Image (cartoon, rainbow, N blue to C red):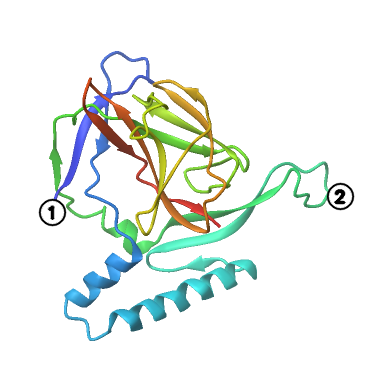
Amino acid sequence: MAISYSLHPNNLTGEGEVYRAVVQSSGTVNLESIIQRMVARGSTTTEADAYAALKDFFTIIQTLLLDGFRINTPMFNCGLIIKGNFDGPMDSFSSSRNWIEISITPGVDLRRITQGTVQTQKQLPGEARPRLLQFTDLNSGQRNSKLTPGGMAQILGDRLKFDPADPNQGIFFVGADNSESRVEVVGKNNNAELMFLIPAALTAGDYTLTVRALMSQTVTRTGILEIPLTVS
């Protein structure tokens, strides 16, 4: 299967007609879907066994990270890092100006898949729809990763403006069970930037961020941030 992409103007270079490639996602796959594919390939492992083993795998990784270990696997390498400034060599960690993040990089096997022959397929730019380029959780300062329920957030992109009076338009957080939480408090609402309050009722888990906006007089289209966001 080929990697589909389209070309879009790169307005950040200031070098005339320079374009950049945007990969067209084939969709989002969660853990349950991966396990189902494993079983469908003829694996003797049941879905329940696979889920239990992976749950233990993830739990051990979290425990090792909290014990200060770095994790090196064929798929990814990760560890904890401390961000923020310190006032001299005698200073100590302060939660008011320091925080802990996860540093993660591709492992050997994951890097290897791009070193061979990857099939690509160019497509014409798709139909007009909201385009989400970056999400920032303003309470934590983290981008494209963390959600703070009840906190402020920002989306940068294109064609983001929507009509808040239309319940079919707006900013939505879609849970793993396909439940939707619509943002009710929006501060800034223009094509390039949205500022809003994350719904306080979001529970722990992963969410897909979407923006729905009217692209013509009658057509509402959805833009998706391809990176899942997490309430811890």
The residue pinned by badge 2 equals: 90
Find residue 1 and name its label.
1
Find residue 139 and name its label.
none
- Give the x, y percent position of residue 10: 32, 23
Left or right, 220 with respect to 88, comes to left
Q: Is residue 203 above or below residue 126?
A: below
How many numbered tags mark residues here? 2
- Give residue 79's quadrant in the image: bottom right
Q: Secondary structure at mark 2?
A: loop
Q: Residue drawn 17% across and 52% down?
A: 117
Q: Secondary structure at mark 1?
A: loop
Task: Looking at the image, tell me whether mark 1 or mark 2 is earlier in sequence order.
Answer: 1
Q: Quadrant of the C terminus?
A: bottom right
Pick the residue in front: 103 or 190: 190
- Within 10 Å of disc 2 (Cα), the crowding (few <14, some 14-19, many 20+) is few
Left or right, 132 with respect to 230, comes to left
Pick the residue in front: 228 or 14: 228
Q: Is residue 186 above or below residue 16?
A: below
Q: Residue drawn 32% across and 68% down?
A: 32
Q: Which residue is at the far bottom?
A: 44
Left or right, 225 with respect to 26, comes to right
Query: Residue flagged by tag 2: what amino acid is it?
Result: Met
Q: Is residue 37 above or below residue 53?
A: above
Pick the residue in front: 126 or 18: 126
- Give the x, y percent position of residue 131: 33, 31
- Give residue 130's quadrant in the image: top left
Query: Residue flagged by tag 1: what amino acid is it?
Result: Met
- Give the x, y percent position of residue 11: 35, 19
Q: Which residue is at the far right?
A: 90
